[in-house]
Image (cartoon, helix red, strand yellow):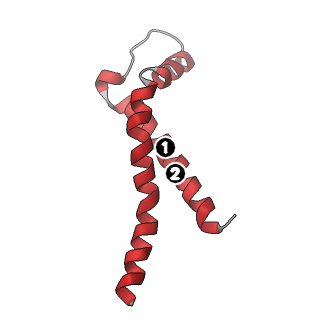
Amino acid sequence: MKKRAVQSIALFLLALFVIYFALSFMVPGWRLKLSASPMTVLLENLRHMASLKLLITLPLSALITALPILAEKVEKAGKE
């Protein structure tokens, strides 16, 4: 695999993970408040509204992944 492909995949997965966790714990209405063990609370927060969180997270992750590629293309076009 090319270096750029590996970097893009890694950036996409990192962005997906960070955005999903941010939506799970930083949006007050989407956070569950359970009186249970910390592991149970974590797992239930990740499962709660998972489809909606993924619908928001996937396009944002794709956009974040595309930004370095687009910036490089703009930079090359400016040099020509």
Which quarter of the image is occupied by the N terminus?
bottom right
Residue 53 drawn at (x, y percent): 41, 31
Q: Residue at x 37, y 76 (%)?
A: 74
Residue 31 drawn at (x, y percent): 37, 22
Helix or strand or loop: what does disc 2 sit on? helix
Which quarter of the image is occupied by the C terminus?
bottom left
* Residue 76 location, quadrant: bottom left
Q: Residue at x 35, y 85 (%)?
A: 78
Q: Mark 2 near mark 1, Cβ–Cβ under 8 Å?
A: yes
Which residue is at the far left?
Answer: 29
Residue 52 drawn at (x, y percent): 39, 28
Q: Label 2 neighbourhood size at 10 Å, few (<14), some (14-19), many (20+)?
A: many
Residue 16: assigned label: 1
Amino acid type indicated by mark 1: Leu
Residue 57 drawn at (x, y percent): 42, 40
Which residue is labeled 2 in the image? Answer: 12
Q: Is residue 77 left or right of residue 36?
A: left
Which residue is at the far right?
Answer: 1
Amino acid type indicated by mark 2: Phe
